[in-house]
Image (tube, helix red, strand yellow):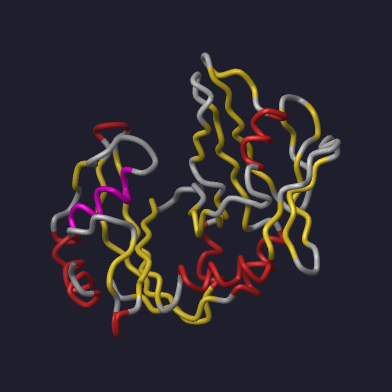
Amino acid sequence: MQRYGELVDQLPDIKSMGYVRTRRAGNTGIGKTLEDLLGVRENNFAGPNGHDTELKSGRKKSGSMLTLFTKSPLPPGINGQLVERFGRPAGKGAKLHTTVNAVSRNTLHGSPAFKVELRDASIELGHGGYGDLQPPYWNRLDLERAFYRKYPRHLLYVKADCRGAGKSEEFHYNEAWLMSGFSFARLVELLESGHVLIDIRLGRYPNGKLHDHGTGFRVKPDYLDTCFGNRERIM
């Protein structure tokens, strides 16, 4: 695996390539293409002193949210129960796709549904129709530890101009920022103000097996740097 500095050193060469055709159609194409160009197999790589540095990329002038972290809520097995209670038929299976914020209750299937509720010791997905179902939640302390494991040192955020669409989309990676000093307290503030959202992406296959695309904590691009104490433009 390449070291952090070696990857950063490649960025000017990638910038000089100009527009590069996507390696995958869809929203994830920008990240997959950058990882391929850098020779990175996964969305993290060995950073300085053995620590990890998270790699993320984004389209300029795009309102698409960036996923900071994915973590299923508690208690164990709650995702399957959510699909059963609130999902809708999808082919021969079922799905539950919705985005939740802490400012106002969202709408699901035409009715008021979920809202993020911040408790002293937990972050909860509130809903008025749980009945006997225990509300999904994240223990604050466990969530904080998980975030700091995800961002122990740096976040490398690479931005690109884009043109085309689908399989013909092209990216020109020409801006990069190095961020450090992740703050869980700032993230909670952004969650409370509605700038960090929680995405639920669940489903059930026809054979009954649950598929979980990751319950994601997602941030609006303009607020990404707010989660970090320091940021430096490196390209």
Q: Quick one: 33 or 153, which is closer to the camera?
A: 153
- The answer to which of 144 and 228 lies nearer the viewer is 144
Above/below status of 145 relative to 126: below
Tell me what residue is drawn at x 27 percent, y 38 percent. 24
174 lies above or below 97: below
Question: Can you give x and y, in whole percent of width and height, for residue 43 in the image?
Answer: 33, 58
The image quadrant of residue 184 is: bottom right
Residue at horizontal 50 percent and vertical 29 percent from the top:
209
Above or below, 215 against 81 in this view is below
Horizontally, residue 60 falls left or right of residue 25, namely right
The picture places residue 170, in percent across and down from the top left corner, at 25, 43
For this rendering, which residue is in front, 146 or 188? Answer: 146
The percent position of residue 200, horizontal first and vertical second, equals: 60, 42
- Main SS category, magenta section: helix
Magenta segment boundaries in residue numbering: 29-37
Is residue 146 shown left or right of residue 172? Answer: right
Q: Residue at x 37, y 74 (%)?
A: 178
Taking the image as shown, residue 16 lies to the left or right of residue 55, namely left
Q: Quadrant of residue 27?
A: top left
Q: Quadrant of the C terminus?
A: bottom left
Residue most extreme to the bottom: 49
Q: Quadrant of residue 120?
A: bottom right
Quadrant holding the N terminus: bottom left
